[in-house]
Every structure is written in structure tokens, then in C-alpha cells.
């Protein structure tokens, strides 16, 4: 079993009393220069479709008065593919994902320098390989090795799991089983104990979160609702309100009024994460201000 959840989150804090005071509720390093003046401890995620946009866009937004808008940027998306000859799952980066990883100094490091965590989101690719159908522990560990290597190789802050589009059963692969995802999480956590592991709460893996007395939430850091424009609390054993995002918005698709309402509900009900998707290249500060005013009492400023 890996390090306990709370201890792991504390490992992610910045050094020094000031940093601990500013971020103890979030488990994330503070923004460069000054801690974000929070009206609540809520974190914001930013999924970026890197086929079209740079993950570095998450670093272009600040709160009026200082501090980052986004705490976690997610590169969307790498894939879990299936090698039909070797009969094994493998990590695949399409050319656009690979280009951003290779040019990390341009796309990733500036955001990390501001205290934003950058994660690689991993998605199914219609080939039968998924997080929920590894046939045994050794297969799950082999895939965890690839994920951990990517985190180390490209200087990332963790891995996000999105169990969509796997097409379980294709290419002779198995159907989802009860142990696969927990085995994968155990293996990955042991390899990246001081990094983030998050769950986009969808697909067979999201329904198989306990096995052999182990809860996925003891190995995950955060989980979020995947349905944009809605409210839905992820049911992840071992995670509580500070680690969950029931609210999810599509920045280019959810109405401003719905986004504002979901932000208010996040604060009033005491949840710790607010999930956003589809941050593009255009200035979205007016839209995001509807969210940040309700989360933090501050407007969003676009820094370009």
C-alpha cells in the first residue's frame, strides 16, 4: 500500500511556514510571488485540447490582485493503445501531444514556474485497452512503468485517468474486471509517490474503485465530474469534499450563468475542486470572471 492520502498531499506543499499557511487546504504549491487570496480553498482545473491549443494557456490567467486562476493544467490527451502482436497496453502520444512534451520549455515550464501543476491525461483509443481490463497485476505494473517514465522524462506533475473510448473487448481484449484499476493505481502510486494522480469520473474504472480492501481514493488525489454544465458528486471511496469537483464546465460551451451558479454551489457546499474543460487561445477572462468572483471574490485578468 502507498503513502496515506493526507501525507501525500502534504508532500506537495511548498517549503516554509508561509507556503504551508497559504496552501495547507489545497496540497499544491502557491503561485510565484504571492499566495492566491482565496475566499475558499477551492482549486481550479484546466483541461486543454492540445491538438488545437497550448497547455501553456493555463498560465495566462491571474486573479485581480495576484495569484493564479488555474491550479492544475491537464494535457488532453495521451492514449492507452493496444499492441495486438505483443498483446499489451502501451502509452501513445499523438504528434500534437508529443510536440508539447518535447517543447516543455515553451508549453509546460512557464506554468510550472508559477506553481501550476501540469498533468498528462490518458484516454482510451477504441483499441480495447483500458484501465479496467488488465488481465493481471504484472500487466498493470508494466503500464504503470510507462506512465511513471513519461512523468519523469518530461518533468510532469502527475497522471489523470479518463476511461472513455476504450472499446473494451476489441482486438480480443477482456471485459472490465474488479481488480485492474486498483492494481494500476497501486503500481503507479508506488512509482510516483510525490506526484498527483487524478480521476475523470467516467467509464468502467469509475465503477470499480475498491478491491481486496483497498480503496482507490487512498491512492488518488482528486476526482471530478466529467459532465459539463452539470453538478454530480463523484463517488470515490477514500476521497472527501476537499478532493472532489461536482461542478464541471466547458469554457467554450457552458453558459456564463450556469458556470457562475456552479461556482457558487461549490463554495456553499464546501467542495474543494472546480473542473473546467476546453481552455483555448482567445481571451476568456470575462467568462472566467463569472467563476472566480464566486469562488474567490476576484475577477479574472488575462495576461496574454
Image: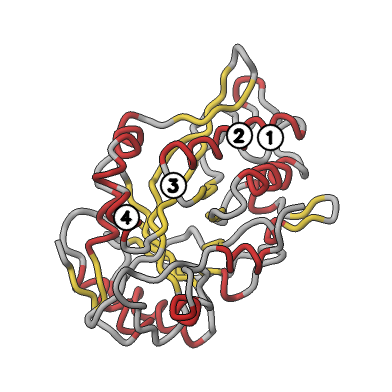
Give the camera-side residue of 207 and 281: 281
Q: Whole-Å distance between the Cαs marked 4 and 3?
A: 20 Å
Label 1 packing within 10 angstroms: few (<14), some (14-19), many (20+) = many
Q: Which residue is mark 4?
A: 278
User: Do residues under tags 4 and 2 come within 8 Å of each other at their CB atoms?
Assistant: no
- Residue underneath mark 2: 145
Which circle, 4 or 2, is nearer the viewer? 2
Check the image and report above or below for 219 versus 79: below
Give how far across and how far down residue 108 sits, in percent.
32, 48
Q: Is residue 10 above or below residue 292?
A: above
Residue located 32% across and 87% down the image: 297
Element type where label 4 sits in the image:
loop
**Which comes before the other along the chain, label 4 or label 3?**
3
Percent x, y of residue 162: 52, 47
* Tag 1–tag 2 contact (CB < 8 Å): yes
> Which mark sits nearer the N-terminus, 4 or 2?
2
Query: What residue sits 45% from the left and 76% below the top?
Result: 19
Residue 231: in sight, yes or no? no
Secondary structure beneath label 3 = loop
Q: Secondary structure at mark 2?
A: helix
Residues under labels 4 and 1: Cα distance?
Answer: 31 Å
Nearest to the observer: residue 64 or residue 23 = 23
Q: Which residue is mark 3?
A: 156
| Whether residue 261 is visible | yes
The nearer-to-camera label among 4 and 3 is 3
Q: Residues within 10 Å of mark 3 (few under 14, many from 20)?
A: many
| Residue beneath the point at 55% across and 39% down | 148
Q: Mark 2 packing: few (<14 Cα in 10 Å), some, or many (20+)?
A: some
Query: x and y percent of residue 62 in the render?
Result: 25, 71
Amino acid at each position: 500500500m502507498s503513502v496515506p492520502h493526507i501525507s501525500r498531499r502534504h508532500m506537495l506543499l511548498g517549503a516554509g511556514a508561509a507556503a504551508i499557511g497559504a496552501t495547507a487546504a489545497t496540497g499544491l504549491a502557491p503561485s510565484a510571488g504571492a499566495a492566491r487570496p482565496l475566499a475558499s480553498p477551492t482549486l481550479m482545473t484546466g483541461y486543454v485540447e492540445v491538438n488545437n491549443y497550448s497547455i501553456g494557456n493555463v498560465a495566462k490567467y491571474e486573479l485581480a490582485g495576484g495569484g493564479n486562476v488555474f491550479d492544475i493544467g491537464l494535457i488532453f490527451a495521451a492514449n492507452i493503445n493496444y499492441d495486438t502482436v505483443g498483446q499489451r497496453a502501451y502509452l501513445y502520444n499523438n504528434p500534437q501531444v508529443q510536440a508539447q512534451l518535447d517543447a516543455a520549455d515553451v508549453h509546460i515550464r512557464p506554468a510550472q514556474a508559477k506553481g501550476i501543476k501540469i498533468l498528462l491525461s490518458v484516454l482510451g483509443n477504441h483499441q480495447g485497452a483500458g484501465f479496467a481490463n488488465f488481465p493481471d497485476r504484472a500487466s498493470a505494473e508494466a503500464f504503470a512503468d510507462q506512465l511513471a517514465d513519461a512523468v519523469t522524462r518530461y518533468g510532469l506533475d502527475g497522471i489523470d485517468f479518463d476511461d472513455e473510448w476504450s472499446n473494451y473487448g476489441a482486438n480480443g481484449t477482456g471485459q472490465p474486471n474488479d481488480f485492474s484499476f486498483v492494481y494500476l493505481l497501486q503500481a503507479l502510486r508506488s512509482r510516483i509517490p510525490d506526484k498527483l494522480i487524478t480521476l475523470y469520473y467516467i467509464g468502467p474504472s469509475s465503477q470499480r474503485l475498491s478491491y481486496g480492501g483497498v480503496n482507490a481514493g487512498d491512492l488518488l488525489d482528486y476526482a471530478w465530474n466529467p459532465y459539463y454544465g452539470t453538478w454530480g458528486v463523484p463517488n470515490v471511496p477514500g476521497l472527501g469534499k476537499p478532493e472532489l469537483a461536482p461542478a464541471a464546465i466547458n469554457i467554450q460551451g457552458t453558459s456564463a450563468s450556469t458556470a457562475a451558479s456552479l461556482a457558487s454551489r461549490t463554495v456553499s457546499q464546501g467542495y474543494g475542486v472546480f473542473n473546467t474543460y476546453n481552455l483555448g487561445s482567445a481571451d476568456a477572462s470575462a467568462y472566467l470572471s463569472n467563476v472566480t468572483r464566486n469562488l474567490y471574490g476576484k475577477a479574472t485578468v488575462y495576461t496574454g
